[in-house]
């Protein structure tokens, strides 16, 4: 009987081995097939009696579910398997699994080298495998979204509590390494002798925070007792009696810790900067309120908000205010200045509403904001001379004809003169072109069928003010209102198949709500302007025609049996002749008499002198315009021998000449000849643009233009009055990737929002304590580049050259002459240096210079920027943890530029 029981137990074990755990290898193939036989088994086996299972134990057919479920202590099906073997020890009431073992129970999953299930105590043991090389197949414990990789684990399937030894778990970008971890339930873990780090090298982390005891709420928080920072296992003086690490994966509100330091350049004393609170208002909008405070009383406030609605729109808003004090009150060098800046950027998704669109790009504030702000983000923008804003809404009404309307508000501010121009608002309406004589079918042919007209309207409320009056009622005193309607009528046709002819007539009517009347006061001996409120209008019109053609010239260098490098040169000439005529509108002009010692004189004026859109002309105009456009390109044999087609290379992208002759003028009929051109060379990496103005008339002894040709006055055919040239060149070695990092892109976007340059020639916008302009973490590509680092040092260089010449009144001077450059070089995979500077050849001195140093310290990063000279001399040093999770662990020290402000 014992032998039979052993045979039955072996048969049962082998059946479970084959059918339940599904890890048996395929049987060797035979050369001859074995016929299958079906035989009924008459033996009834009571599995429960064989395994001595409890009376009410339910045995599940393993061929159906690959699992075992015991109602006595399990609440769900337990599924388990292993690669080498699964052994059931009935005496110990344990199941042993070896090599790539897995256990699944409810939301719990354990993978390990060895797993033991003790179903008498409701425990699951998991551990590593030991071999000649050490240990392998460490346990991986998963429950829900939580993953732990310990050396060993004991899990209670009834209470779902666990003891975990030498565990490694990732929490929201950070890693927790603990000698002993107690899993209390799904949402609470307690650890002893743990380490918290964001390092990628877990075997030898660059730094960690050692925690004696800690409580972990997965994906929410980590609360610790006594903690101390270690750098490469060396303890540091940074000891915290307790610590709190937020671990939420979603956007949450919280405190933004400030950086501290001392401002010695402007005697503002010690400071706290970039501190405040972040409000996670919703998934669509947030708000950050930041502030700076200096011990001498200076302070700054910044509010920034981002918002987005997918497939609809996105944007950001910011408001910055700074109250800056220099020195201390009562000292002779004390000065106070208040500056502010408002920015708003809004863009609408193109698919949101094809027929209407709303956009905004606002940058307004104090004229001296970028020159005097202590915010590091403004370092590269202090050379901005103009602030510009635009907010617009447009709507299209489909139909025939289509009607388009738009409303916009614009702002333009010169930071040097502090002049501000506003339009609040501008209305524009237009109707698409109508062809009254077009055929119902087919294409339009001839002058009659191509006749078309459209209607355009524009209305503005324009304000010209200054920085000191902006926002006050006085800014509206000189506001001007006007509206203009225009109806252009055009047609075009071909003459002799090669000449394109177009004719046009334009009718404009201007409306205004304010005119003037002039009188002469003989007592005061002055002209008095009397403003008259009320609607008034004037109508003007003009006519024009033009004819043009295109000429092609080709010179072929190819000869029979020869294959020169330059195969052909093609020259394209586009001459154009235009004529325009405009009558005199004398009916809108009046006169007044001036009586003085020389007698009575009559002065002419128009009541529309202050019109928004100019005044009607009172002189007959008839002019002939001449324009010649040139394009020269070559066909060059390709350097790639596999290509059969020649490559096209531009020699001159464009070379244009233009002038006009006034048929109605009594003198100085010819206007100056304007020349402009441009090309790209060196594989299109260098762009060259140039221009000049040539005047055919001479100057008298008082440097005034006279009605005498320069050649008849002993000079050349033309007199060069102005010239300019601009060149830009970007070059790098083969090792340089040529792609911008996310930090550089964010820096360029910040500079663009502020109206600055995006090429880094005026320096880069950087504030290392502000994580908006830094990489969050190192990417996989960066790691790969470090491993495959080329022995050649990657570098890039950007050059920009500009020169302007002026000789309008015999000045014969170079008004500006400068060379700007910006470059970066990777000294090693983790060392990068860069510089932006320039040289002013006219004033013989260096322009604004910025030196940049960056060191990747794996889990840390170190940055240093230095402006060595000029009134903007400053430096900024930063070292801190790269991960956003612990970005407040940093050291930031800076010296601000000296400020020169008035009282």
Image: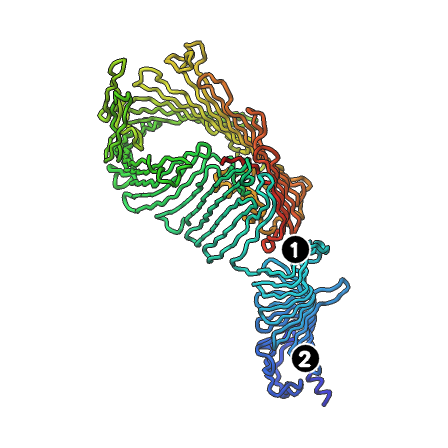
Is 298 rendered above or below residue 505? below
Instruction: Name the residue: 52% across, 54% down.
Output: 277
Whether residue 726 sits left or right of residue 789 in the image: it is left
Q: The N terminus appears in which quarter of the rendering?
A: bottom right
Instruction: Name the residue: 69% across, 53% down.
Output: 206
Q: Disc 1 designates what residue?
A: 199
Is 885 rendered above or below residue 337? below
Residue 13 got which mark?
2
Q: Residue 544: percent from the left, percent from the top?
A: 30, 27
Whether residue 658 sits left or right of residue 643 in the image: it is left
Q: Nearer the viewer, mark 1 or mark 2?
A: 1
In the image, farthest residue toward the left: 587
Whether residue 173 sits left or right of residue 92 in the image: it is left
In the image, farthest residue toward the right: 132
Q: In front: 269, or 150? A: 269
> Visible in this render: residue 643?
no
Q: In front: 314, or 631? A: 314
Q: Residue 890: percent from the left, percent from the top?
A: 62, 50
Q: Residue 56: percent from the left, percent from the top?
A: 60, 86
Whether residue 768 sits left or right of residue 425 in the image: it is right
């Amino acid at each position: 009987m014992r032998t039979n029981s052993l045979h039955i137990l072996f048969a049962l074990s082998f059946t479970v081995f084959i059918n339940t755990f599904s890890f048996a290898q395929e049987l060797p193939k035979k050369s001859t097939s074995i016929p299958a036989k079906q035989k009924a088994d008459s033996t009834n086996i009571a599995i429960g009696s064989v395994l001595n299972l409890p009376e009410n134990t339910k045995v599940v057919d393993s061929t159906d579910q690959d699992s075992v479920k015991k109602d006595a202590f399990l609440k769900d099906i337990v599924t388990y398997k292993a690669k080498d073997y699964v052994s059931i020890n009935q005496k110990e009431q344990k199941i042993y699994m070896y090599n790539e073992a897995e256990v699944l129970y409810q939301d719990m999953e354990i993978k390990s080298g060895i797993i033991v299930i003790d179903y008498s105590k409701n425990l699951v043991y998991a551990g590593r495998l030991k071999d000649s090389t050490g240990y392998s197949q460490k346990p991986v414990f998963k429950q829900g979204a939580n993953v732990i990789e310990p050396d060993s684990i004991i899990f209670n399937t009834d209470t779902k509590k666990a003891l975990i030894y030498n565990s490694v778990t990732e929490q929201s970008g950070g890693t927790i390494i603990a000698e002993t971890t107690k899993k209390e339930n799904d949402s609470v873990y307690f650890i002893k002798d743990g380490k918290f780090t964001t390092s990628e090298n877990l075997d030898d982390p660059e730094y960690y925070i050692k925690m004696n005891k800690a409580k972990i709420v997965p994906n929410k928080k980590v609360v610790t007792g006594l903690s101390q920072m270690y750098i490469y296992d060396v303890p540091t003086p940074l000891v915290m009696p307790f610590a709190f690490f937020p671990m939420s994966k979603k956007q949450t509100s919280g405190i933004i810790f400030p950086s501290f330091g001392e401002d010695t350049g402007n005697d503002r004393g010690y400071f706290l900067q970039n501190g405040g609170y972040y409000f996670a208002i919703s998934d669509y909008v947030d708000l950050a309120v930041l502030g700076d405070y200096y011990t001498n009383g200076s302070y700054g406030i910044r509010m920034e908000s981002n918002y987005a609605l997918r497939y609809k729109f996105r944007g950001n808003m910011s408001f910055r205010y700074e109250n800056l004090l220099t020195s201390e009150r009562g000292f002779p060098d004390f000065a106070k200045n208040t500056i502010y800046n408002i920015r708003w950027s809004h863009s609408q998704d193109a698919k949101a509403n094809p027929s209407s669109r709303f956009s905004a790009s606002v940058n307004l504030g104090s004229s001296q904001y970028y020159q005097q702000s202590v915010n590091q983000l403004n370092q590269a923008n202090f050379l901005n001379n103009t602030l510009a804003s635009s907010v617009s809404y447009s709507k299209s009404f489909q139909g025939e004809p289509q009607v388009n309307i738009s409303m916009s508000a614009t702002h333009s501010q010169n930071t040097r003169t502090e002049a501000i121009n506003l339009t609040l608002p501008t209305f524009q309406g237009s109707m698409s072109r109508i062809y009254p004589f077009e055929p119902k079918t087919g294409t339009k042919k001839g002058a009659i069928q191509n006749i078309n007209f459209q209607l355009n309207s524009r209305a503005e409320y324009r304000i010209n003010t200054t920085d000191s009056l902006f926002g006050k009622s006085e800014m509206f005193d000189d506001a001007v209102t006007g509206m203009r309607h225009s109806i252009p009528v055009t047609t075009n046709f071909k003459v002799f198949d090669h000449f394109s002819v177009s004719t046009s007539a334009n009718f404009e009517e201007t409306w205004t709500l304010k005119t003037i009347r002039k009188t002469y006061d003989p007592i005061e001996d002055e002209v008095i302007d009397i403003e008259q409120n009320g609607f008034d209008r004037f109508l003007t019109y003009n006519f024009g025609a033009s004819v043009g053609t295109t000429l092609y010239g080709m010179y072929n260098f190819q000869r029979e049996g020869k294959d020169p490098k330059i195969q052909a040169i093609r020259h394209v000439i586009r001459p154009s002749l235009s004529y325009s005529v405009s009558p005199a509108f004398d009916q809108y002009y009046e006169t007044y008499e001036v009586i003085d010692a020389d007698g009575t004189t009559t002065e002419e004026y128009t009541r529309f002198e202050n019109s928004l859109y100019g005044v009607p002309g009172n002189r007959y105009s008839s002019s002939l315009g001449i324009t010649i456009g040139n394009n020269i390109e070559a066909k060059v044999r390709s350097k790639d021998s596999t290509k059969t087609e020649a490559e096209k290379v531009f020699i001159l992208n464009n070379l244009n000449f233009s002038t006009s002759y006034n048929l109605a003028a009594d003198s100085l009929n010819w206007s100056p000849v304007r020349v402009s051109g441009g090309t790209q060379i060196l594989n299109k990496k260098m762009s060259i643009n140039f221009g000049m103005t040539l005047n055919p008339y001479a100057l008298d002894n008082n440097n005034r233009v006279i009605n005498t040709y320069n050649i008849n006055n002993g000079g050349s055919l033309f007199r060069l009055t102005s010239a300019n040239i601009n060149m830009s060149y970007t070059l790098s070695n083969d090792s340089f990737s040529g792609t911008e990092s996310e930090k550089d892109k964010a820096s360029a976007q910040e500079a663009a929002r502020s109206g600055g340059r995006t090429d880094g020639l005026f320096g880069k916008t950087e504030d290392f304590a502000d994580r908006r302009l830094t990489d969050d973490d190192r990417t996989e590509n960066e790691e790969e580049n470090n491993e495959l680092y080329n022995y050649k040092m990657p570098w890039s260089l950007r050059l920009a050259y500009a020169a302007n010449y002026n000789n309008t009144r015999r000045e014969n001077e170079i008004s500006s002459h400068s060379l700007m450059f910006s470059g970066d070089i990777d000294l090693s995979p983790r060392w990068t240096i860069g510089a932006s500077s320039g040289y002013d050849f006219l004033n013989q001195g260096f322009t604004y210079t910025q030196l940049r140093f960056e060191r990747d310290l794996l889990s840390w990063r170190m940055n240093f920027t230095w402006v060595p000279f000029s009134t903007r001399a400053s430096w900024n040093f930063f070292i801190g943890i790269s991960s956003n999770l612990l970005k407040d662990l940093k050291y930031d020290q800076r010296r601000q530029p000296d400020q020169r402000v008035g009282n």
